[in-house]
């Protein structure tokens, strides 16, 4: 697969993934953490704010492709 096509597909997937993830994480917090103290909200959003990076890293690695061999 050409590198430009792989980058385009990966970019679209990352955008969709971040939007869906943000909606799900916020919906969960609104439904289950409404009465929690501020520090629980802080810890939850720090954790969920960093958690989406793991699948994004794998997708970016795929987008980069294989390193050329010498």
Image (cartoon, rainbow, N blue to C red):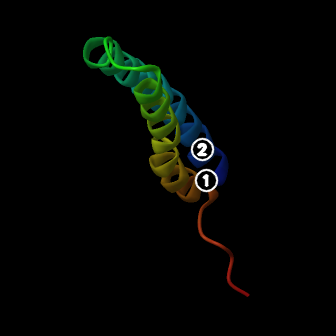
Q: Does dot 2 land on a helix, a strand or a loop?
A: helix
- Does 29 sit left or right of 31 as displayed? right
Observer-nearest of 14 and 40: 40
Q: Does dot 1 land on a helix, a strand or a loop?
A: loop
- Which residue occupies 60% across, 38% down? 8
- Which residue occupies 64% across, 53% down? 3
Observer-nearest of 45 and 7: 45
Please give the label number shown on residue 65. none
x and y percentages locating residue 51 in the rendered image: 45, 43
x and y percentages locating residue 13 in the rendered image: 48, 35
Position above or below: 32 against 61: above
Position above or below: 57 against 70: above
Query: Is disc 1 in contact with disc 2, using a CB cutoff of under 8 Å?
Result: yes
The quadrant of the rendering that contains the N terminus is bottom right
Please give the label number shown on residue 2. 1
Position above or below: 67 against 33: below
Residue occupied by mark 2: 5
- Which residue occupies 40% across, 18% down? 26
């Amino acid at each position: 697969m050409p590198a430009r096509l792989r980058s385009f597909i990966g970019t679209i997937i990352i955008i969709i993934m971040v939007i869906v993830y943000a909606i799900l994480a916020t919906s969960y917090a609104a439904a289950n953490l409404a009465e929690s103290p501020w520090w629980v909200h802080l810890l939850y959003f720090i954790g969920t704010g960093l958690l989406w990076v793991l699948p994004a890293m794998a997708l970016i690695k795929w987008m980069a492709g294989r390193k050329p061999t010498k």
